[in-house]
Amino acid sequence: MGLKRLDKLIALNCNVSRKDARKLIKDSAVSVNGRICLRAEELIDVEADDVSVKGYNFTIKEHVYIMLNKPKGVVSATRDPAKKTVVDIIPDDLKRKSLFPCGRLDRDTTGLLIITDDGAYAHRIMSPSHHVYKTYEAVLSYPLYDEDIAKLEAGITLDDGTECLPAKVEAFTTSDGLPAGRIRIREGKYHQVKRMFAAVGNHVEQLRRIQIGTLHLDPNLPEGESRELTDEETQLVFIDE
Ligand code: URA
């Protein structure tokens, strides 16, 4: 990751402005490797140096990667004048400036969403050229027939003429006995899963994202809650099944 300025790292990790970070440094509140450091421009080796603020040691990181189990009713945006966003519901201890969601889930869609402040990482997940697969479970109005699955797997054309790449699809029944489909796609067109099922005459009643690449939604993470991803987990999104 290389060397980073001390004031920038303090601002990122303590969720304060760069100006406040410089004040903390000036007020002798910051130590590097056990010695008070008064230079805001000091270059820190993120992997090797120990940094503490007001005596508290913390692991300094350039970026943060969060798994959110998105609940219904929140919008996949950074801010919204009227509605609660996925960033609003991240707890304070994980919050940083510049957090944003990697892609969008509809307001009524639940499940796996990654929130980060790393633009390059988000681009790799969202750009179609990187072929990152996303897996959804949809509760449907009607059972999914083999011929519907064949059409979706061949690459279906939506009602407005939009062409979708071939998907992987399987039918199943929920524990409540409702018809459902599991679908794996690597695009992110507007309302894509709902429109794909609509194109075979079905209707999505509920939609949940359960997987990105080989990163699964943590079954122990209740809806509305989030946790930091491990370094290994951040890379699972780029590994295909
Ligand atoms: N496809 C949809 O239709 N909605 C989502 O939220 C995600 C994928």
Image (cartoon, rainbow, N blue to C red):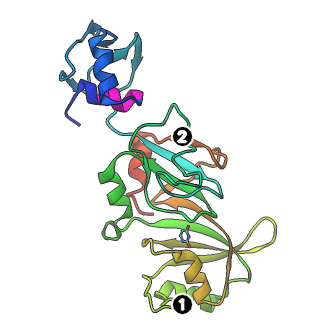
Q: Give x and y (percent) for residue 89.
A: 58, 44
Q: What residue type is disc 2 on?
A: Arg
Q: Earlier in the sequence, mark 2 or mark 1?
A: 1
Q: Main secondary structure of the magenta part?
A: helix
Q: Position of residue 213 (x, y in %)?
A: 45, 60
Q: Would you say the residues marked 2 and 1 are in contact, meaning their CB atoms lie under 8 Å apart?
A: no
Kindly identify the residue that appears in the image at 40 percent across and 9 percent down.
Answer: 55
Q: Which residues are magenta?
A: 9-14
Label 2 and label 1: CA atoms lie apart by 38 Å
Circle nearer the viewer, 2 or 1: 2
Give the image location of residue 2, x and y in percent. 19, 34
Residue drawn where x is 34% and y is 29% of the image: 11
- Residue 209: mark: none
From the viewer's perspective, tell me whether residue 87 is left or right of residue 187.
right
Q: Is residue 14 above or below residue 137?
A: above
Identify the element where label 1 is drawn: helix
Residue 50 in sight from this viewpoint: no
User: Residue at the spot x=46%, y=51% of the render?
Assistant: 78
Label 1 sits on residue: 151
Picture disc at residue 227: 2
Which image quadrant is residue 43 in?
top left
Dot 2, crowdedness within 10 Å: few (<14), some or many (≥20)?
some
